[in-house]
């Protein structure tokens, strides 16, 4: 009898790919497969040659890059010395999760599928490409793909004699069991203190608790958008970074939400517990201390403010003692109920906590050990570093828009991380923020004589402030910045700093204040108005171009403006101009970092 083993490997940035991988894992167990679900970088890639059946689920980030938790796997897979037939016994399938509003839609999944095929793998199905832009999200592709996939897999690995597929009505076991400790019990670990790591560079598993030194609003009080320049003290952390790098911040839930959650689920926030994995080879969540209090779990780990996914409602339906609530939960977790779920959850951006309020009978029946299956962990947030150590030693600054917007729900939506950070006033106490630094996508030229053209509307200017501070400290004068915002008097970030550098001859500054006149003016218009200078810097002085900011229409409009410069000043045809821009991208002379 062939061993029925399935491995599901995921590369996930925001948690969607992980959630989908875990769904495949649950479906595999219902079909009596021995199944492991792992992040690609947690898996020992050298074992891939021994695997018989693997499903890859991977997201694409930024400009067609692999997620952080599959970067090492990616480097290994594309090594030139891997023999072409090395994966000849592997049956595999690739599911990509992407967003078709980005130019490199599902680039990682397509490339992974092609590479495994090249190494001799046997694809069970063509690569499947889920799209966030679809009305029903990636599920529009995932649902039919999964049906086809199980048909293929069960043809290769039929159910053992006498076994049926376990009904979806049977509640799956939890990943962990939760054991409450007696009030007075002493536990070997001696409470909530995390073991202190040896002096390693801070990382996700060992962040540095940085003190908030200043938290300053940089937009006018009358402006609709609250933007902050926040400074952290990282003295003694061992953190090193350069312009273009990113600081990762681990946010937490606010005390009011934590209290509400505990009341809804009838949990005592001060109760201590330990977790035990239900599967022999499973590990415990790395970021939770053992033992842990319910308050710590809910404050620092469970993402109760995220918009819940379909899998949340599916699991919730198993606990429901109320028929009406159970029917609604089952509808939300069915393929037919996805439009309904989208209208209930995604469109109004309803949070997990708010959804729990709407199902009170079910919520108070949730067994505590299922909390970690039900609610994902709080993900760290990435911010471009907006300062240079050469100008501000032992400090990290970020430029952050406080996320707050209205939907059809009466309560405004608030960003978890930005709302929390904005509330930390260093004049009212010693506030610490867990953070670490990772390499960013943008690299600035090593040669100080190479000029840089930086295009950074809004908070997109953050990495360029770091670059300009760094370059000015090194005596570089070829700094050209195109900055755009709504109004000069309301949201012209760092105005005094830029103007001083212009006076000293370190900066050429071009501003576009879109709402200060009848006709809206954006950075792309300023690029076209200054086409001769842009062409001269590019053509005669080998300048590098950098672009950062919101990924809606801006990147395409800027690319168009640059192409028009190449045509009008460089005499290139439209197709040559497009080719030239692509060549600049390839040679890293045109780099961009955009976000949605």
Image (tube, rainbow, N blue to C red):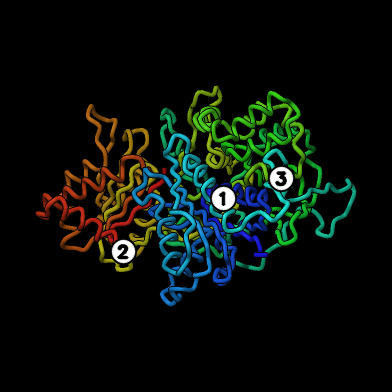
Between 202 and 45, the residue placed more toward the observer is: 45
**Residue drawn at (82%, 57%) of the image:** 190
Q: Position of residue 374 (x, y in %)?
A: 67, 42
Between 487 and 503, the residue placed more toward the observer is: 487
According to the picture, the residue beneath numbered tag 3 turns out to be: 172
Between discs 3 and 2, the one toward the N terminus: 3
Q: Dot 1 lies on which element?
A: helix
Q: How many marks?
A: 3
Task: Give the class, few, some or many, for how many residues have Cα within 10 Å of label 3's Cα (few <14, many ≥20).
Answer: some
Q: Quadrant of residue 427?
A: top right
According to the picture, the residue beneath numbered tag 1 turns out to be: 150
Any part of residue 264 in sight: no
Any part of residue 70 in sight: yes
Q: Left or right: where does residue 548 sit relative to residue 507?
A: right
Where the N terminus falls, by quadrant? bottom right
Task: Give the class, few, some or many, for how many residues have Cα within 10 Å of label 1's Cα (few <14, many ≥20).
Answer: some
Q: Nearer the viewer, mark 1 or mark 3?
A: 1
| Furthest-left residue in this view | 571
According to the picture, the residue beneath numbered tag 2 turns out to be: 475
Q: Check if mark 1's residue and mark 3's residue have beta carbons within 8 Å.
A: no
Task: Give the class, few, some or many, for how many residues have Cα within 10 Å of label 2's Cα (few <14, many ≥20).
Answer: few
Q: Check if mark 3's residue and mark 2's residue have beta carbons within 8 Å.
A: no
**Residue drawn at (61%, 67%) of the image:** 200
Q: CA distance from mark 1 to mark 3?
A: 19 Å
**Residue drawn at (88%, 45%) of the image:** 183
Between discs 1 and 2, the one toward the N terminus: 1
Q: Position of residue 491 (x, y in %)?
A: 37, 36
Q: Check if mark 1's residue and mark 2's residue have beta carbons within 8 Å.
A: no
Q: Left or right: where does residue 295 sit relative to residue 243?
A: right
Q: Dot 2 lies on which element?
A: loop
Q: Dot 3 lies on which element?
A: loop
């Amino acid at each position: 009898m062939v061993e029925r083993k399935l491995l599901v490997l995921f590369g996930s940035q925001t948690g969607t790919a992980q959630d989908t991988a875990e769904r495949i894992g649950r479906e595999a167990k219902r079909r009596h497969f021995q199944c492991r679900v792992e992040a690609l970088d947690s898996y020992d890639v050298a074992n891939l040659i021994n695997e018989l059946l693997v499903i890859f689920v991977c997201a694409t980030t930024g400009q067609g890059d692999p997620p952080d938790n599959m970067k090492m796997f990616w480097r290994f897979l594309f090594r030139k010395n891997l023999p072409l037939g090395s994966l000849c016994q592997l049956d595999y399938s690739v599911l990509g999760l992407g967003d078709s509003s980005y130019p490199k839609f599902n680039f990682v999944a397509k490339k992974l599928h092609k590479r495994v095929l090249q190494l001799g793998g046997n694809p069970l199905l063509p690569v499947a490409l889920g799209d966030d832009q679809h009305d029903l999200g990636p599920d529009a592709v995932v649902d039919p793909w999964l049906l086809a996939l199980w048909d293929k897999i069960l043809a290769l690995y039929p159910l053992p004699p006498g076994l049926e597929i376990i009904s979806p009505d049977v509640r799956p076991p939890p990943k962990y069991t939760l054991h409450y400790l007696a009030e007075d019990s002493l536990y070997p670990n001696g409470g909530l203190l995390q073991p202190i790591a040896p002096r390693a560079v801070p990382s996700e598993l060992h962040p540095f608790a940085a003190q908030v030194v200043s938290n300053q609003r940089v937009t006018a009080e009358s402006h609709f958008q609250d933007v902050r320049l926040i400074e952290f003290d990282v003295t003694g952390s061992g953190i090193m970074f350069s312009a273009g790098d990113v600081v990762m911040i681990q946010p937490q839930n606010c005390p009011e939400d934590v209290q509400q959650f505990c009341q809804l689920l009838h949990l005592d926030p001060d109760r201590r517990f330990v977790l035990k994995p239900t599967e022999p080879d499973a590990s415990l969540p790395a970021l939770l201390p053992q033992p842990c209090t319910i308050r710590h779990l809910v404050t620092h780990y469970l993402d109760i403010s995220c918009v819940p996914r379909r899998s949340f409602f599916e699991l919730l339906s198993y606990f429901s003692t109320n028929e009406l609530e159970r029917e609604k939960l089952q509808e939300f977790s069915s393929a037919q109920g996805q439009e309904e779920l989208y209208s209930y959850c995604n469109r109004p951006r309803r949070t997990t906590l708010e959804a729990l309020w709407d199902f009170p009978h079910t919520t108070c029946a949730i067994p505590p050990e299922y909390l970690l299956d039900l609610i994902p962990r709080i993900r760290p947030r990435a911010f471009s570093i907006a300062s240079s150590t050469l100008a501000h030693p032992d400090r990290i600054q970020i430029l952050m828009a406080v996320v707050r917007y209205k939907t059809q729900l009466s309560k405004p939506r608030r960003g978890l991380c930005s709302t929390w950070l904005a509330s930390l006033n260093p004049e009212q106490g010693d506030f610490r923020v867990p953070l670490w630094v990772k390499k960013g996508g943008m690299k600035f030229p090593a040669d100080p004589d190479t000029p840089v053209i930086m295009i950074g509307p809004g908070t997109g200017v953050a990495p360029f402030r770091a670059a300009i501070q760094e370059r000015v400290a090194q005596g570089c004068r070829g700094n050209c910045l195109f900055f755009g915002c709504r109004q000069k008097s309301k949201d012209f970030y760092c105005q005094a700093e830029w103007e001083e550098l212009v006076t000293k001859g370190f900066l050429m500054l071009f501003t576009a204040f879109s709402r200060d006149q009848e006709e809206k003016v954006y950075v792309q218009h300023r690029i076209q108005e200054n086409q001769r200078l842009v062409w001269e810097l590019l053509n005669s002085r080998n300048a590098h171009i950098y672009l950062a900011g919101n990924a809606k229409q801006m990147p395409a409009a800027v690319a168009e403006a640059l192409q028009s410069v190449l045509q009008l000043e460089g005499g290139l045809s439209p197709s040559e101009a497009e080719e030239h821009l692509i060549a600049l991208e390839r040679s890293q002379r045109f780099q961009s970092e955009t976000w949605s």
